[in-house]
Amino acid sequence: MATSSRRAAATLGVAAAGVLAWSTLIERRLFTIRRHTLPILADGAAPLRVLQLSDLHLAPWQTNKINWVRSLAKLRPDLAVLTGDLMGHLQARYALLHALEPLTAAAPTVFVHGSNDYYGPRLKNPLKYLMEPSRLSTREPDIDNAALTSGLVGLGATDLNNSATVLDVRGSRVELFGLNDPHIRYDDVELMRQARAALRAEGSETTSPPVQIGVVHAPYQGPLGELLSDGADLILAGHTHGGQVRVPGVGALTSNCDLPTMQARGLSVWYDAHRAAFLNVSAGLGNSIYAPVRFACRPEASLITLEAARP
């Protein structure tokens, strides 16, 4: 009996060591592309390929990630959307801009920030990730967010933090409106709506209805509801890392916000009594340098093809 118990314990130890090695050394480097097709364009419209990147948590030495992100320009997207937490180190800005340069040169690009674009990573108790997340800024920002924003704008990207823009993409009018990160309460719905009103006052509105895309980093239910009520056909978000560690057959253990865990990764629908919109939550491409692990949750970018509804 004792021998059987020792064998079982040894087997469990070997399995645990294998899971640890896989999740820390292999899976978190297996970058992949998650693809979706959504029927939300007007009849006869040409398909639009939207590339969403989120949660790079980039550190300057992560050359494999940098090279992979640079290679995404070969997908020839029509629009790129960056949903925050791009920075993963205090000194990552130049590496990040280098990684994004081919993409911003290839397609119109918009972005919102996440909390890690204001705060550098710190060592934390990983079990806190499973608890209710803190939404309070408890220290002074130590990342130069103004320089990051300026760098992204310098590449040609459009700042959607509590703002809005209109683009003509392959013959379709696309209206994008975004919120700064709700996770640290930087979202300002009224400021975003003022930006949308200013666009209408400038004559950007036409008789043909636009495709409306809402953008936010952390998919808290309140901000999702605001984007939905503002007419979003599609909402793009990140933040959750897809749970980062998922249990096969169960899924994510946490979304690190109040989003239901079943919606912590991938495509779903967000709705209320009056409206519904597609919601894509990217599991992102990175992780904190102090939590270098992914299990059953490969790092990803999302390529979403928008097309006309089929008869």
Image: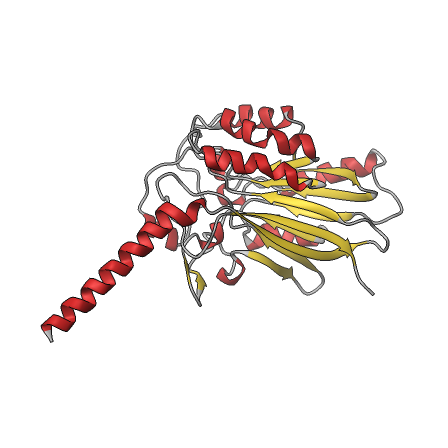
What colouring does the structure picture have?
Answer: secondary structure
Q: Quadrant of residue 83?
A: top right
In which quadrant of the rendered image does the N terminus lie?
bottom left
In which quadrant of the rendered image does the C terminus lie?
bottom right
Indicate whether 197 appears above or below 272: above
Name the side, left or right, on which 163 lies relative to 144: right
Residue 154, given in percent of the width and then of the height, sits at 63, 23
Which residue sits at x=73%, y=52%?
306
User: Is residue 162 at all visible to an observer of this figure?
Assistant: no
Q: Quadrant of residue 201?
A: top right
Which residue sits at x=53%, y=56%?
265
The residue nearer to you, when weighing 91 against 224, is: 91
Which residue sits at x=63%, y=48%?
303
Indicate whether 119 appears above or below 228: above
Name the side, left or right, on which 212 lies relative to 74: right
Q: Quadrant of residue 89?
A: top left
The residue nearer to you, when weighing 6 against 275, is: 6
Q: How many marks?
A: 0
Which residue sits at x=47%, y=47%?
30
Residue 225, given in percent of the width and then of the height, sits at 63, 54
Q: Residue furthest right?
A: 207
User: Is residue 149 at all visible to an observer of this figure?
Assistant: yes
Residue 192, given in percent of the width and then of the height, sits at 67, 40
Indicate whether 138 appears above or below 20: above
Q: Residue furthest left?
A: 2
Name the side, left or right, on which 307 lies relative to 10: right
Residue 227, given in percent of the width and then of the height, sits at 66, 50
The residue nearer to you, when weighing 197 against 119, is: 119
Name the side, left or right, on which 247 lies relative to 48: left
Indicate whether 39 appears above or below 170: below
